[in-house]
Image (cartoon, coloured by chain):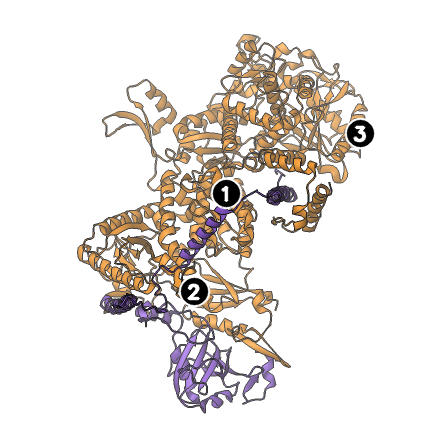
Amino acid sequence: MAPSKKKHAKNQACVIPGGFTVLSLQFSSDSAARHSLYVKEHRVRAERSSHRPLDRTLFVLNIPPYCSEDVVKDLFSQFGSVQSVELRDHPGSSQESGPKLSKFFKPAEKQGFKVGYVVFQISSSLPAVKSHPHDVPLVVCTEHRPVKTGLQKWIQQYTNSFIQPEQLQQKVDSFMEDYDKRKEEEAERQKKEAEEEQEDEEGWVKVTRGHKGTKARPHSEAANQRTLQREITKKKRKELLNFYTWQHRNTQKEHIAELRKKFEEDKQRIALLRAQRKFRPY
Amino acid sequence: AHYENEAPVKAKRSKADHAGEEVVYHPVKLSRNDLYRPPTAEELNQLKEAESLFHCSLLKMQMEELLKEVALSERRKRQIDSFIQTVTKLIQTVPDSPEVEVSDLSWLSGAVKVPFLLVPKTTKGKFHMAPPSSIDLIGSYPLGTCTKPNVMVDLAVTIPNDVLHPKDVLNQRYPRKRALYLAGLAQHLASSSDIGTMQYSCLHGNRLRPVLLLTPPGKDSSSFTLRVHACPAPGFFKPSRFHPQRNNIRTEWYTGLQTSQSGKISSEPPTPHYNSSVLGDLLPRAHLQFLSAVSSQCSAFTDGVALLKVWLRQRELDQGTGCFNGFLASMLLAYLLITHRISNSMTAYQLLRNALNFLASTDLTVNGISLAKDPDSTAVKFHDAFQVVFVDPSGHLNMCADITACTYKQLQHEASLSMQFWDNPTVDGFQCLLMTPKPMIRTSDHVFQLCELVKLQSSCKKLNLLSELMDHSGDYIHTALPFILSLLQQGLSQRIHLLTHSLSPDPKWSVESEAPKHKAQPPLSFGLLLRAELSSTVLDRGPPADSPKAAEFRQLWGPRSELRRFQDGDITEAVLWHGESICQKRLVPKQIITHLLQLHADIPESCVRYVGAMVDDVIKTGSEESLVVVQSYDDLSRKLWRLEGLPLTITAVQGAHPALRYTQVFPPRPLKLEYSFFDREKTSRSLVPKEGKPCPVYITPITVICHMEGSGKWPHDRLAIQHIRAAFHIQLGELLRKHHNYTCRPCPTHLDVWKDGLVFRIQVAYHREPQVLRESLTAEGLLVVRDNDEAQALEMATIHKPLLTSTLHGLQQQHPCFGAACRLVKRWLSAQLFSDDITEDTADLLVASLFLQPAPFTAPSSPQVAFLRFLHLLSSFDWRNNPLIVNLNNQLTAVDYTEIKNGFMATRESLPVMFIATPKDKKLSMWTKRSPSIQMLQRVIMVAAESLKVLEHQLIDGSQKQDVRVILRPPLEAYDVVIHLNPKQVPLLDQAVDPPAITFSRGVMSGSAAQPGGPLPVIDYNPVSLYLGELREAFGDLALFFCDPCGGTVITVLWKPKAFIPTPFKTSQVSARSVEVTGDETKTVPNVEAILEDFRIMGKGLVKSVEARTEKWSF
């Protein structure tokens, strides 16, 4: 194992520069080698997220792929009851947008090493974790908590992958219903806005800034591009080419520069072929 | 002026800098100053010229450079001249010896042997040694057409007249005296220290014309060879004695039997070959004079000859018995000049082109040509005696006496091919005409060898060739060869385009040993260029039984010919060959060849070593199985089209799987399952693998893309499209179940259909979905279109893959061996653990390029030759500086080619290392975008070159231990960790390169495929690939993982050196790493022990052992 760890006395927590505490983790009690988890209290200035309360959230690095959320929850329960566990591929703020997806439609998760956010019930659990001695490893797979890996896991995965068509149909229907509703609302709102922009009896038009993406005219990059292009060609048509002497001279200069560049390129191409001995037939 | 001088210096310097490493093309960067400086008048002119002449002068420049490479340097010439002087002086001092009988060799010391096979033993005449009357340079060196490599300088030593007698022409007396004279010279030279090595050889393999090979001493010994010929004085023998109808070897002397009509010369058979071999010694000086005169008229003559020689050499036509050598090349150009087919002012480039054009269009086997003054009278008389006729200026000698008709046909074939390539603007003419070697094993579709050449002696007897044997002075191999060739040509007739044979190399032996026997030469190889559509038919239909030609047919085929009645009512002679599978049918030519050789030439089957399909064994059968898959798919496609009750109509059903284009290495087989082997999943009536049993049989899902009509009903939102698609899968599955009773399993991404013992995976596609994926709204509400991986992957799966599949399916219809070639190639790639780097689609495209752009070959007609060319392509293609253009469906024009090349050059740095352009993908090379990486490509190139070398050696050399699978066993020494898998859990075990001794029951019953319905089988469940996937996801940034997907039982691991450099602690980079604290610094390194432990944990049940090669690790 890494020699650095031997410096620390037995039964003591190992804290490395940067404020992380090192916890060792092994798969089963008879495993020879151990992984190291790096833990620290979650502290991010910008984040005011409700599901990662600053004083109760533990930030865990380097969680091996065979540890699911349940396993992690169980592992850390010895320090105090755990409210929730969130595993992610990369550290960062949680961002969830769009409509809630059923599990059938969620993109497949990556099965690599993860970072975790463990939220405890009470804030006093954090110091308990941080003072855990590094030479007492956390054990993933024990008798009362068997963790399936390898063949057993794949067979289970295969068995669980079956989806009842009726259930799937139901999910699709409910999503589409939801989707149609949203579309309808959208259309309703647009209609209302359009109505608002109509003249009222006295001839007044109410002009509003409007919501995101609800401009009346087509508002896309391609359309912008087209408009810009039209402007440029209009401008070009008015311009005089090779009218002034300096313009004429410039064109000629550009032409010669172009020729020179091509000449140089050809020469280099031949030199390259020669250098590579591309002419030796055998 | 400053500008002009500067550039070459720069180029030189950069060349020196790059010496040793790979030279690469960098886009030119000129400073603003350089670009916009005021030009001088001179520079302006130069620029204009370069602009207008560059492209046509490129070929000219290339040829000039090539000529520089093959020309002799001044230094070499000086060496040669001084060595000639030394040797001349030495030879002039050869001592006299007393006159003895020819058979008396006592004057020779035992150290030097006579370079002659004395058959029959004795002949009359007296011999003594005497200094030569003159010593002259002849051949290519004085003419200036001598080229590298194998520089050969010819020196003619004239035997003094008193040694010879004008009647020596008879009964090999002259050739024997000449051999004695050479032996005398060798004995004299042996004592000198100015000679490096001394060997005997014979001119063009003709044992009657021995020569002495001398090399200079010291380190120059390999740089050139001096060839000493002994000749009579010009005009010593009367040329009229050598008329092709005259006899100069008496049967009585040759056989040693008294015949009743002895003395009657009229009944003696003519000896044209013997005559021309003696005559050849009389004329070299005259030929040199003639050629010098022609050469002085035409300034490009020597360069033209040099180019033609390079062309011949690349085609292995310039050396050996019956070759079209440099001398003939010069004579051919002289003929063209004299007959005004080319003019004196033409360039070397034009000379080559005209010579090839002449060869392609003139058949010298029918209409011989002559350099003599009155050609009409001469050429005709030679045609009876020789197969190919080209008469020399004297009108007495046929210079093509030894060339067989087959060799000349080969020459013609090559010439016309070359003309085609030259005229094709999309082919790099220079490369394929002059730079690419065409060894027989890579050129011919099938090759076979005659191994025990001594058996040809009995062939001569069987074919009744005594007088021909006499004419060839006992060389039974070249006596029998033309007859065997014509026999095979007759038997194979419509099945082949061309029959070629190897030219026996000139034997060389030390002066101290006896001349080797005829049988001592390497085996004769024959090459067949097959006609793809006819080569594997099992029936040879002959003439009707009552026609006069029937007897001829029966004579040719012997007992194999039998009367057959055909469906159209005809009763004809016919021969039926064995051949049930496509694999066996490919070997019908082999059956024909062995049968004919046995029947007519007494050559047993054991002597014929057929290397046409030795490698094919690796992929076994499979062509038939592909056919079954395609048929089943066609049926499914029809049924899908006919489905009613869908809210939208189906607009296209397309296959997108290698099995549907015949290129799957081991195509899926219809299966019948043994249900008791599996567990059941109750709710969905499906089988699942049972714990503790061997892994069940692997069932490949065959991808089928089903395009749905575009309509306003489709939502314009990515998630909504996903859901609608899922609904379609459910509905399609429901309809297929209801109408056809197929078991189906709908998923959000696909629908699996269990049909005819196969599983088809239907994916519904909507053509506007990629566009929807690309669109997004910015915060300001602006609609932007941005390309992304997701959209590209979707386009790849639903548009490009189906298109490629149908295009290659079409290619298979044109070239029946395309599929088998792809399968062979992919078997090699997977066995060498490259299948993740060169993907299936890439490999198929590479093979397709061999069929679409075969230059300088013809499109391959056997999987083996395609495989050899694939290895050659991989290893020799300049991937750094050239795009590989695969002209699918012939859609690209010459203009497109230039456009692709220019685009490629301009943006080389940002493009994939292996760049493959197709008509639908000219700029991006989408198939090779992700892989291979530069390192892997280099390794692939290296392994391909090595495999090619080993394999060709195996195929050519019959004496080696025959095991072509050597090239499929990758070396495991290079890897850091080897994970051994439990064979029981490797489902594709029986596809392994070396089939395992034990087999496991995998839940399959023999017998025909299952009926529709029944529970759904275990689909796409392969623990090995699941494990690999997990390993790559977890440790992909620390190591590379390799595995043979076709039954490999090891996974090899290579650490990434970069990941093992200690790095500072960062929250984003601590995966599987341990920390080391030194003072304030915290560094992390991979936690190797824990990782190795993880390999075991994650593959529990599959992994047998993890072998860490710690001794290799350097961190």
The mark found on residue A25 in the picture is none
For label 2, the SS is helix
Percent of width and height locating residue B995: 42, 55
Q: Earlier in the sequence, mark 3 or mark 1?
A: 3
Chain displayed in purple: A
Looking at this view, is B943 or B1070 the one in front? B1070
- Are the residues tagged 2 and 1 within 8 Å (C-beta)? no
Quadrant of the rendering where the N terminus of chain B is positioned: top right
Residue sitting farthest toward the bottom: A124
For label 1, the SS is helix
Report which residue position mark 1 lands on: B899
Observer-side mark, 3 or 1, equals: 1
* Structural distance between the alpha carbons of marks 3 and 1: 59 Å
Kind of residue at disc 2: Gly
Report which residue position mark 2 lands on: B1029
Q: Earlier in the sequence, mark 3 or mark 2?
A: 3
Kind of residue at disc 3: Thr
Q: Chain of mark 2?
A: B
